[in-house]
């Protein structure tokens, strides 16, 4: 090497140093590696991590002029094309290194296991934005989530649970809407698909002994979680094993939440939408997950696959999913990688799936306790929990915020975002549990499925709302029973709605469905085409409209929206209302896809 070549080599070295070093002296690529991952590398040769690429495709929110299936297909194809194509060079690099990996497209990321040398090489790449740990962090001492409290149920159980009664779901059933034609999804600890309250509602159900699990079930658990303090797969610790080919629940939590959404057996109805179908994804190993397991389930719900993880089909995506889980720092989620899980959630929502999330169980006495993904995200429909209470003066039950229910605002990301969005019954919720039994459980985990069930009822009443998460959310908050509260957590010392304790209030199934029906596109008639006479009326109310040859359904509600009577389909246009008390009432007339509401006065 001559002097000129030596000088040029030294120049390049110096230039490289400044190009890859920060003003503090650390290489610039090192700042792409999370502190948690750097700590892991000090004690572990090979670690699990996630590579997040710079290129991130963000799907638009298509709420208008597209069917849910068309929207889901478009978002799926654009995400897959854009994100997977941008991974090509990085995948070639990993293949050359002989490294195993799992690719994602719902967020542009790749889950990898490797050593410090590999991580340094990856961090130095221009196409890599950030590398975060995908491993659990052991804590000294015992750590558990206060999610579920169980006790033996009484021998005589009422036909429906107190939560279902509180949200007035029974009145919706009387109107003829029980969730038929709607698919609900859940990502949780898994599901006991053979439970008597769930088995016939499973979308893959064939008969009592057989089912097709393709496109209806996915297991994102590929290894034992060390937070469970064991490493051996057995019926005594993890009865499901890994990559289970059929729905299985290694904890009980998931089976309970699914029961609250759709469960029923004969006269016992534990689910808000008992005629809906369900599909599921296991994202936790005995209650513990990590970023990649949660992202994997989000991706699967966007385009469910067969059992081999192939042939994704966005047409088989659910209409609404429940997420009774959180990803705290102990599981690998922190402020440096929240945005990537939020991208995954937002892209799923953009495909038309409505996403219900539990607020958390950190207690109402501390502001800002809604503090972990996915509850903190703007497009999560975050749900707090209420408990039953008795008014001795009115001799009636009502509900108040549960003491464990987390409250807002979201301060952990400095957004001051209002959360929760809504509340629902979440204390002593009676539902299914593995082994064909039923138990009581407490938690916002139990509240969120009530809301997911209400969404299923809304979509059953008005399928035109499928794929329109923005419209669904607006209906839910507009029709919630207001729960005024002093909003000191948001700097407001007055009683107000919404507030950081109840959000916009407690969900009301009947009001939500009524509003969903009002939004139905008129078919052959509208409110101006329908005449009620005489009005005011004493004994007989007559209905006049032109479509005399088509059957219709009539329901009468009081002014508070409670269903009083429902007349079976027919062509009867004369109603006997003599048994009603004096006052104002609302008549609902439904014919095919058209629904109208008219007021009348009983004298």
Image (cartoon, grey):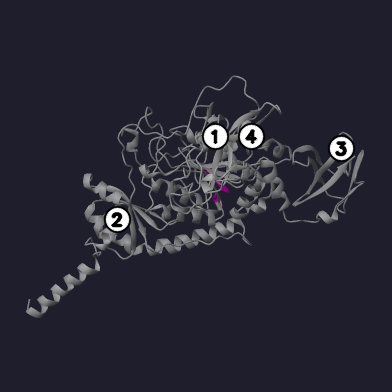
Out of 123 and 315, give the one closest to the viewer: 123
Q: Tell whether label 2 touches label 1 (CB within 8 Å).
A: no
Residue 33 vertical placement versus 227 (above, below) = below
Q: Tell whether label 3 touches label 2 (CB within 8 Å).
A: no
**Numbered disc 1: secondary structure:** loop
The image shows residue 368 at horizontal and vertical percentages of 47, 45
The residue to which callout 4 is attached is 164
**Numbered disc 4: secondary structure:** helix
Q: Earlier in the sequence, mark 2 or mark 3?
A: 2
Out of 74 and 418, give the one closest to the viewer: 418
The image shows residue 339 at horizontal and vertical percentages of 42, 55
Q: Residue at x 31, y 38 (%)?
A: 138
The residue to which callout 3 is attached is 582
Q: Earlier in the sequence, mark 3 or mark 4?
A: 4
Q: Is residue 371 left or right of residue 401?
A: left
The residue to which callout 2 is attached is 33
The image shows residue 299 at horizontal and vertical percentages of 46, 51
The residue to which callout 1 is attached is 402
Looking at the rendering, the stretch of residues picked out in magenta corresponds to 316-322
User: Does any portion of residue 169 appear in the rendered image?
Assistant: yes
C-alpha gap between disc 3 and disc 4: 29 Å
The image shows residue 30 at horizontal and vertical percentages of 26, 58
**Numbered disc 3: secondary structure:** loop
C-alpha gap between disc 1 and disc 3: 38 Å
Q: Earlier in the sequence, mark 4 or mark 2?
A: 2
Q: Of all residues shown, which one is farthest toward the left? A: 2
Q: Earlier in the sequence, mark 1 or mark 2?
A: 2
Q: Of all residues shown, which one is farthest toward the top? A: 155
Q: Earlier in the sequence, mark 1 or mark 4?
A: 4
Out of 490 and 282, give the one closest to the viewer: 490
Residue 142: name its quadrant: top left
């Amino acid at each position: 090497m001559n002097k000129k070549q030596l000088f040029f080599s030294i120049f390049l070295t110096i230039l490289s140093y400044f190009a890859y070093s920060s003003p503090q002296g650390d290489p610039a690529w090192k700042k792409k590696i999370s502190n948690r991952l750097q700590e892991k590398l000090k004690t572990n040769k090979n670690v699990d991590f996630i590579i997040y690429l710079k290129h991130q495709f963000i799907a638009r929110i298509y709420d208008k002029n597209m069917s849910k299936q068309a929207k889901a297909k478009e978002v799926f194809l654009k995400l897959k094309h854009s994100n997977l194509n941008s991974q090509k060079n990085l995948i070639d690099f990993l293949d050359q290194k002989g490294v195993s990996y799992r690719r994602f497209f719902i967020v542009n990321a790749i889950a990898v296991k490797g050593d410090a040398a590999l991580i340094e090489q990856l961090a130095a790449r221009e196409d890599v934005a950030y590398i975060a740990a995908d491993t659990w962090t052991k804590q000294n001492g015992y750590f558990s989530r206060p999610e579920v409290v169980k006790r033996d149920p009484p021998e005589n159980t009422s036909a429906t649970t107190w939560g279902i009664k509180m949200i007035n779901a029974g009145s919706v059933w009387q109107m003829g809407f029980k969730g038929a034609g709607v698919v609900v999804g859940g990502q949780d600890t898994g599901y006991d698909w053979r439970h008597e309250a769930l088995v016939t509602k499973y979308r893959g159900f064939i008969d009592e002994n057989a089912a097709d699990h393709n496109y209806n079930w996915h297991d994102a658990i590929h290894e034992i979680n060390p937070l469970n303090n064991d490493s051996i797969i057995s019926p005594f610790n993890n009865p499901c094993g890994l990559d289970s080919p059929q729905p299985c629940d290694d904890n009980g939590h998931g089976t309970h939440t699914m029961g609250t959404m759709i469960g029923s057996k004969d006269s016992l109805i534990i689910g808000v939408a008992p005629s809906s179908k369900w599909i599921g994804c296991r994202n936790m190993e005995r209650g513990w997950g990590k970023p990649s397991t949660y992202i994997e389930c989000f991706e699967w719900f966007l385009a469910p696959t067969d059992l081999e993880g192939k042939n994704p089909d966005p047409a088989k995506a659910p209409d609404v999913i429940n997420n009774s889980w959180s990803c705290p720092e102990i599981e690998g989620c922190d402020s440096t990688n929240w945005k990537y899980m939020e991208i995954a959630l937002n892209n799923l929502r953009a495909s038309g799936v409505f996403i219900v999330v539990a607020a958390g169980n950190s207690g109402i006495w501390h502001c800002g306790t809604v503090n972990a993904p996915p509850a903190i995200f703007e497009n999560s429909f975050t749900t707090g929990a209420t408990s039953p209470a008795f008014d001795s003066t009115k001799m009636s039950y009502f509900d108040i915020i549960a003491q464990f229910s987390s409250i807002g605002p979201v301060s952990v990301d400095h957004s001051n975002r209002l959360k929760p969005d809504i509340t629902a019954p979440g204390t002593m919720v009676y539902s299914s549990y593995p082994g064909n039994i039923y138990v009581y459980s407490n938690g916002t985990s139990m509240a969120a499925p009530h809301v997911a069930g209400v969404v299923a009822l809304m979509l059953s009443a008005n399928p035109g709302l499928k794929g329109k998460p923005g419209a669904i959310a607006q209906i839910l908050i507009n029709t919630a029973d207001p729960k005024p509260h002093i909003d000191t957590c948001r700097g407001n010392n007055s009683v107000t709605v919404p507030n950081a304790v109840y959000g916009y209030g407690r969900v009301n199934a009947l009001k939500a469905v009524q509003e969903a029906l009002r939004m139905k596109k008129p078919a052959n008639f509208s409110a101006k085409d329908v005449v009620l006479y005489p009005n005011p009326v004493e004994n007989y109310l007559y209905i006049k409209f032109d479509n005399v040859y088509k059957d219709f359904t009539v329901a009468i509600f009081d002014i508070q929206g409670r269903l009083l009577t429902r007349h079976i389909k027919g062509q009867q246009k004369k109603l006997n209302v003599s048994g009603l008390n004096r006052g104002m009432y609302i008549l609902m007339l439904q014919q095919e896809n058209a629904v109208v509401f008219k007021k009348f006065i009983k004298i």
